Image (spheres, rainbow, N blue to C red):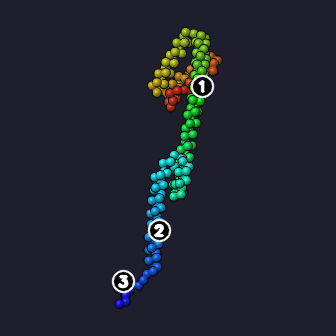
Amino acid sequence: MALQPSIILAGRGVDAMGAIAQGTANGQNMLTAIKQRDQRQAVNQFGAAARQGDENALNQLSRFDPAMAQGLQVTNQNMETSRINADRSAQMFPLQMQGAQLGIDQTMQQMRYLDDTTAREVQAYAAGITAEERAAQAERTRQAVAAALSGNWARFKKIQHQHDRLLLSLGEVPKRYELTPQTDCGAMQ
């Protein structure tokens, strides 16, 4: 008895090209699975060493995934650069603090000089005026301070302007602090 191909193929013709394509796809899937398995094994075996910068481990990983190996290498280089910068900053910090301290010392010296100079000017001014003028000046100062503390800037400016005219009439150039509503510390004029 002869074999009938219609029974085996259930009435369909032979699809040789489809069978070849299906076999090729199955082979590709098997190769992909093997490659993924090998890559997982390489990552498990060399991953920790590669993260720590081991060149041999990076080379082994690059055989399976060059982009991952390059990414690890860039990360390692960035971490090393950050460590070097941190070390440099730690070395520079004492020098920066020393420079800041010198600036503070210089400022303090300038402030002491200005305080001493101002005290001498006040003493010289006080020695040159009468007790009556001193009392009037003290009263004007109390009024100016009260006006400034109460927020009456117009009154403060008026008192300050009268004081400046008095100094000019005595032949002195007025030196004063300019107080404004925006600031509680003045700029020497």
Residue 58, percent from left and from top: 54, 52
Residue 64, percent from left and from top: 51, 58
First along the sequence among labels 2 and 1: 2
State the quadrant of the N terminus. Answer: bottom left
Secondary structure of the residue carrying numbered label 1: helix
Amino acid type indicated by mark 1? Leu
Q: Nearer the viewer, mark 3 or mark 1?
A: 3
Residue 104, percent from left and from top: 57, 25
Secondary structure of the residue carrying numbered label 3: helix
Q: Is residue 27 left or right of residue 74?
A: left
Separation of disc 2 and disc 1 at Cα? 73 Å
In-front residue for pair 118/111: 111
Image quadrant where residue 37 sits: bottom left
Secondary structure of the residue carrying numbered label 2: helix
Residues packed near mark 2 inside 10 Å, few (<14), some (14 to 19) or many (20 plus): few
User: Which residue position is annotated with label 2?
Assistant: 28
In-front residue for pair 152/40: 40
User: Which residue position is annotated with label 1?
Assistant: 102
First along the sequence among labels 3 and 2: 3
User: Which residue position is annotated with label 3?
Assistant: 8
Residue 30, percent from left and from top: 44, 66
Residues packed near mark 1 inside 10 Å, few (<14), some (14 to 19) or many (20 plus): few
